[in-house]
Amino acid sequence: MQLLRQKAKELLIFLIILTLTILIYTLLVYSGHATNEPIKFRITSFLIGLILFLVLGFFSGNIEQKKGWIAGLSSALVVIIFVIIIQLFAKDPFTFDRVLKYLAYLSAGTFGGILGVNFKRLF
């Protein structure tokens, strides 16, 4: 039960940070301070995603304070599975590029967990 509470706490923190990031980026695009050209937009979105998964892994490792790579990997995997389920319902095609993107996000989450476990507990 404690593990589920920890994971819920980690995912809630991630969702709050994700919401704020999306809001800020949307406002920047709307005001013209960020580009909305398709190629640059995809690259920027990917980089923001990497940073967010790194932060998710960091919080996971920091909250659990043991086996940071497993904590970061499992939290990132939960989010990615949730996204895949939503994309299946939306009938969005599953491509090789998307698999590579998910692997990069899993790697960032794992690395974040390794970093997070090495810091004094924040929460």
Image (tube, helix red, strand yellow):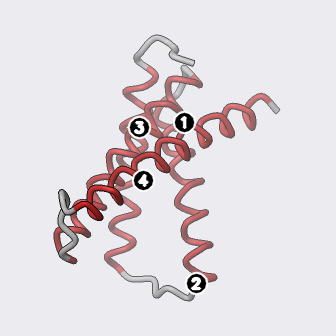
* Nearer the observer, 118 or 38: 38
Looking at the rendered structure, the secondary structure element under dot 3 is helix
Of the residues shown, which amino acid type is indicated by label 3? Val
In the visual, does 92 lie left or right of 119? right
Sequence order check, earlier mark of 1 and 3: 3
Please name the residue that numbered disc 4 is placed on: 23
Sequence order check, earlier mark of 4 and 1: 4
Of discs 2 and 4, which sits in the foreground?
4
Please name the residue that numbered disc 3 is placed on: 55
Q: What residue do we see at 65% from left, 34% from top?
A: 9
Of discs 1 and 2, which sits in the foreground?
2
Of discs 4 and 1, which sits in the foreground?
4
* Nearer the observer, 86 or 99: 86
Please name the residue that numbered disc 2 is placed on: 90
Of the residues shown, which amino acid type is indicated by label 4? Leu
Question: Within 10 Å of the Cα at label 4, are there few (<14), some (14-19), or many (20+) other Cα atoms?
Answer: few
Sequence order check, earlier mark of 2 and 3: 3
Give the quarter of the image for residue 37: bottom left
Q: How many angstroms separate mark 1 from mark 3 (CA)? A: 12 Å
**Extreme-right residue of the structure:** 1
Q: How many angstroms separate mark 4 from mark 1 (CA)? A: 27 Å
Of the residues shown, which amino acid type is indicated by label 1? Ala
Q: Quadrant of the N terminus?
A: top right
Q: What residue do we see at 49% from left, 50% from top?
A: 19
Question: Within 10 Å of the Cα at label 1, are there few (<14), some (14-19), or many (20+) other Cα atoms?
Answer: many
Q: How many angstroms separate mark 4 from mark 3 (CA)? A: 17 Å
Q: How many angstroms separate mark 2 from mark 3 (CA)? A: 27 Å
Give the quarter of the image for residue 77: bottom right
* Nearer the observer, 76 or 18: 18
